[in-house]
Image: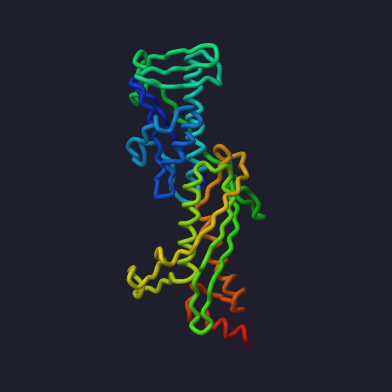
Amino acid sequence: MPNPSTIRIGITSGGEICLHQGAMDIGQGSNTVITQIAADALGIPVAEFRLIGADTAVTPDCGKTSASRQTVISGKAALLAAGALRAQIIRLANISENADIKVSDGILFVSNAETTREIVLSSLSEDAFGYVLRSEETYDPPTAALDENGQGAPYAVYGYGSQMAEVEVDMKLGTVKVLKMTAAHDVGNVINPLLAEGQIEGGIAQGLGMALMEEYHAGLTDNLHDYLIPTIGDVPVIESHLTEVPDPEGPLGAKGIGEHVLIPTAPAISNAIRHATGAELSRLPARPDRVLAAIKASRT
């Protein structure tokens, strides 16, 4: 199924640069990362952008925030839109492609080593969106449906990762405490290292809940008093390693990192429990009673 994203960037007659992006930021930092990508492609500092986001009345569709897609798909649309806007400015100034662009007091200054051209923005006509210069680009990742043999290209960009858990198991009580998680993830060219590390830490916290405590029983665990989730006291030391293997399809070589961290956390913890005790768990979460039963089974 096609799942494209569309990004619009416009410059007002007063020199304001507006980035319309409908990628919902749910804490992963898409507002920051997509703006960074657009700023890099346009050649204008991030601080010069005004973000207009997550409102279907004023932003084009960027699709859902899921499946580690927004940095790659909406980021690529932002890269294309900013690149197209830069090309407009370069053509209008009739100057070399590697020129520097600055905006101040309603004037675009476009310069290279030999000359500087000034574009008075108020002298340009506004379009239907109220911009004197505007670009809008859509990116739909190149994919192919699976054939009858299960072969195809369902995703355009893949991320890779590996995690290791260090645990302490009470052999009499069956309780498990995770002491440290070490996570190495290939995120392509890292757009924002701090946000990438935050994604790793958040994903590990979720995976910890899956591994040790989160278990739903209809009618019994319908609230957060009975349905246990990790607190900051449960989160172990986390050591993050960002491996950069650029992807040719991702914007600036970037890859996503959403579910990539959640998925291996519970298996890493389960393997650590087995390494420590010999107990092979067949069901999660690793409640004390299940751990003790698995330890007993390993001895027989």
Q: Residue at coordinates 57% horizontally, 74% vertically from top-left?
A: 273
Q: Nearer the viewer, residue 126 or 90?
A: 90
Q: Quadrant of residue 96?
A: top right
Question: How many numbered marks have been drawn onto this rendered protein structure?
Answer: 0
Q: On screen, 290 above or below 35?
A: below
* Residue 146, above or below 270: above
Asked which quadrant contains residue 128, the reply is top left
In the shown orientation, is residue 260 left or right of residue 128?
Answer: right
Residue 124 is left or right of residue 1, and the answer is: left
Q: Residue at x 56, y 57 (%)?
A: 183
Task: State whether residue 94 is above or below residue 59.
Answer: above
In this view, which residue lies farthest toward the bottom? 300
- From the viewer's perspective, is residue 299 above or below residue 159? below
* Residue at horizontal 51 percent and vertical 30 percent from the top: 41
Looking at the picture, the colour scheme in use is rainbow
**Is 217 positioned to the left or the right of 183 in the image?**
left
Residue 56 is situated, as x and y percent measured from the top left of the image, at: 35, 40
Tell me which residue sits at (50%, 16%) in the image. Answer: 111
- Give x and y (percent) for residue 181: 54, 62
- Residue in the foreground of this view, choosing between 14 and 215: 14
Q: Which quadrant is home to the C terminus? A: bottom right
Residue 157 percent across, percent down from the top left:
58, 46
